[in-house]
Image (tube, rainbow, N blue to C red):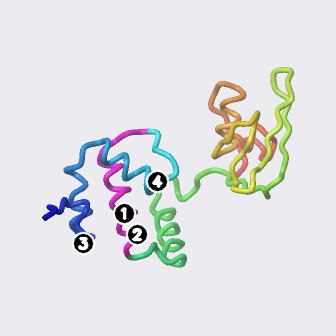
Amino acid sequence: MKRSTPMNDPTLAARVAALPDLAMPELWALWDRHFPRRPRHHNRDYVEARVAYRIQEEAHGGLAPDIARSLAQLGAAQSRRGGRRGVEVRLPPGSVLLREFDGAEHRVVVAPDGLYVWNGERFRSLSAVARRITGVAWSGPAFFGLTQRGST
């Protein structure tokens, strides 16, 4: 008779409860099964929490869109930054941004998935592109002339 391990146990509670006992390679294997890429940091508590949430989300479904919106609004209202995250820029797929910097022309294309493509590399934000081009932290929307300095 095959002995059941907690991760093979069909109950949701047993699967979530087993996460702290897993070796990191096993936890990463679960992460890789549930997420497209690994986080920048490798904090075990963070990895366990995200995997546990995803396991439960798959079993019970995610948040309803109206609840997710309400939670985001509540979080913004309680934020120490007053709910402001800076300028949010949303460009339609296919948009092309041009910027001359250090004697070279830099061309960024907005991909269909909302990522930004520069020199064949994909970036999650314009600020990441600007940082790669300049070597220093820079507001991507400001770097590409989408906002005025100091304005919101």
Q: Position of residue 107 (x, y in %)?
A: 83, 37
Callout 2: 10 Å neighbours few (<14), some, many (20+)?
A: few
For label 3, the residue is 11
Q: Amino acid at mark 3?
A: Thr
For label 2, the residue is 57
Could you tell me which residue is drawn at 33 percent across and 56 percent down?
49
Using the rendered view, name the quadrant where residue 16 is placed.
Answer: bottom left
Q: Is residue 8 magenta?
A: no
Q: Is residue 28 above or below residue 51?
A: above
The magenta stretch is 41-59
Callout 3: 10 Å neighbours few (<14), some, many (20+)?
A: few
Disc 3 to disc 2: CB gap under 8 Å: no
Alpha-carbon span between mark 4 and mark 3: 39 Å
Mark closer to the observer (1, 4): 1
**SS type, badge 2:** helix
For label 4, the residue is 80
Q: Amino acid at mark 4?
A: Arg
